[in-house]
Amino acid sequence: MAANDPQVLAIKQTLYRTGDDSAVAQALISAAERGKEVTVLVELKARGDEAANIEWARRLEESGIHVVYGVMGLKTHCKLSMLVRRDRDRLRRYVHLGTGNYNHVTARLYTDLGLITAREDLTAEAAEVFNLLTTHRRETHFNKLLVAPDGLIEGLLERIDREIEHARAGRPASIIAKMNGLMDQAIIRALYRASQAGVQIDLIVRGICCLRAGVEGVSEHIRVYSIIGRFLEHSRVFYFANGGQEEVWLGSADWMNRNLRGRVEVVFPIEDEEHKRRIYHDLIELALEDRSKGRLMQSDGTYLRRTPHQSDPVLGMQEQLMDLASGS
């Protein structure tokens, strides 16, 4: 739509996985042909998509698009799209921040979340991320976004430590995190400290998890789930009880060293109360209650299929989400 909208003046886009027939890349070319200023960050080292990304970068450049390749030594893994539109009152930025690739194939196979916003505090910082990617300037400061490699790990550790303080003070304290993988040693040590302080921690980790749950004296208050269903669980969701002032974050980063220290990643807050409620009740709770496709880590590191109770619904989380989407 933005490519055809005469009021849209400029588009900026990150592309991590393009694929052979990228509808997004074709739309960007169409926008440039209509005279819009288009800037695209193409990650050339996206595993499995290197050849396709190189070919699309060439085609984008031939169409007059300004193509950049990110910060030297860092993969660009964040999922950002921004446009500048001439509205009735003024020029306004609109931004999409997401957890998934702008890829029409994986969009049908992966579960992902995204936020579209015109809020100035978020769009200004998204524009700053694009400045970081296009000017190679590393000195940045963000108030709203957590951006790797310079601020994300610190922001996560600060929030885990904050839950520890809440637990010690008798305030609501819990952490729920959903991701593809958990390997970072600093994060794992912080989660162990939080468990020992009494913070209840629920981790929904689709793939590799180097943390051991349920170990006496170390991680009694940690539970680790894995859900293997029809769709690949790809969204990253982070919840902090925060003494009753709940925080919900979404983003592109797993809790792995390569994501937190070797990539440009963006994790963004969900501050609208209705959106926070929907993410918690319509996604997190369903994941934690899934006894159809869910598996629970045991203290020896093995996983056991969760046995449904007689009163439990037969449908798993993904099926229930499809029913919610269809209005069933």
Image (cartoon, rainbow, N blue to C red):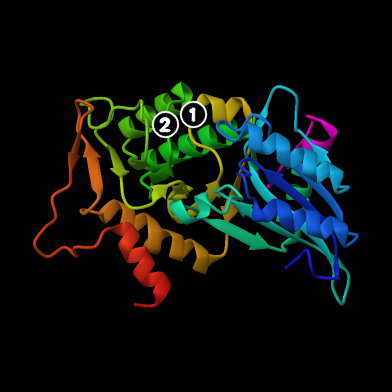
Which label was assigned to residue 256?
A: 1
Tag 1: amino acid:
Met
Quadrant location of the C terminus in the rendered image: bottom left
Residue at (44% x, 22% y) in the render: 185
Tag 2: amino acid:
Leu
User: Quick one: label 1 or label 2, which is nearer the N terminus?
Assistant: 2
Residue at (39% x, 63% y) in the render: 282
| Residue 231, horizontal then vertical, whole percent | 38, 52
Give the magenta range.
133-145
| Residue 126, horizontal then vertical, whole percent | 73, 49
Q: Is residue 323 above or below residue 158?
A: below
Residue at (52% x, 55% y) in the render: 113
Quadrant location of the N terminus in the rendered image: bottom right
Which label was assigned to residue 182?
A: 2
| Residue 139, horizontal then vertical, whole percent | 79, 30
- For the residue carrying disc 2, how many other residues have a C-alpha within 10 Å: few (<14), some (14-19), or many (20+)? many
Q: Are marks 1 and 2 in contact (CB under 8 Å)?
A: yes
- For the residue carrying disc 1, how many other residues have a C-alpha within 10 Å: few (<14), some (14-19), or many (20+)? many
Q: Quadrant of residue 14?
A: top right
Residue 87 in view: yes
Q: CA distance from mark 1 to mark 2?
A: 6 Å
Asked whether 285 or 61 is in front, the reply is 61
Q: Secondary structure at mark 2?
A: loop
Q: Is residue 236 above or below residue 181?
A: below
Q: Is residue 158 above or below residue 22?
A: above
Magenta stretch holds residue 139? yes
Asked whether 211 or 195 is in front, the reply is 211
- Viewed as shown, does residue 93 lie left or right of 76? right
Q: Quadrant of residue 153?
A: top right
